[in-house]
Image (spheres, grey):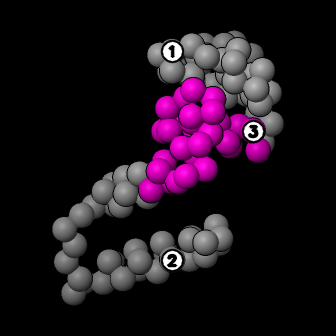
Amino acid sequence: MKKHDLDQLQTAIWSIFREPFVKTTFTPIDFEMMVLEEVRNRPEYCALATALGIEPKDAPIVVLAYQYASPLATVDERSLLSIKEKVNQLIGIEIISADEALSIY
């Protein structure tokens, strides 16, 4: 599904839920968590996570940093910051701490 199509689908779903006659049992936060879980479980992100030795939850973030050729600022010392040299060597993404990012900008 293309990004544009997904945006249209999400807009259509939420417009239905705003109707006064529709009663929902979940909140927008629940919906966001479902979407996030689906994104994290995509095979390409799981494969990237395995290849880089990162957690699957971090794979979409690493992909965005790669696509935009941007440093990835994080406070995740347990996962991303602990393997920043490996990730930089393998795919050229610089991972920096939030403190480093604040001192740069």
The picture places residue 24, in percent across and down from the top left corner, at: 22, 72
Q: Is residue 48 visible?
A: yes
Tell me, for residue 77, which label it has, or none. 1
The residue under label 3 is which amino acid type?
Tyr
36 over 77 or under it: above or below: below
104 over 33 or under it: above or below: above
> Which residue is located at x 76 percent, y 44 percent?
67
Q: Mark 3 points at which residue?
A: 66
Callout 1–callout 3 Cβ contact below 8 Å: no
The picture places residue 84, in percent across and down from the top left corner, at: 66, 17
Q: Is residue 52 magenta?
A: yes
Crowding at dot 3, Cα within 10 Å, few <14 / some 14-19 / many 20+, comes out as: some
Marks 1 and 3 sit apart, C-alpha to C-alpha, by 20 Å
Q: Give the range drawn in magenta.
A: 38-67
Q: Is residue 101 visible?
A: no
Callout 2–callout 3 Cβ contact below 8 Å: no
Residue 85 falls left or right of residue 82: right
Badge 1 or badge 3: first in the primary sequence: 3
What secondary structure is found at the residue carrying circle 1?
loop
12 over 88 or under it: above or below: below
The residue under label 1 is which amino acid type?
Glu
Badge 2 or badge 1: first in the primary sequence: 2
Q: Mark 2 points at which residue?
A: 9
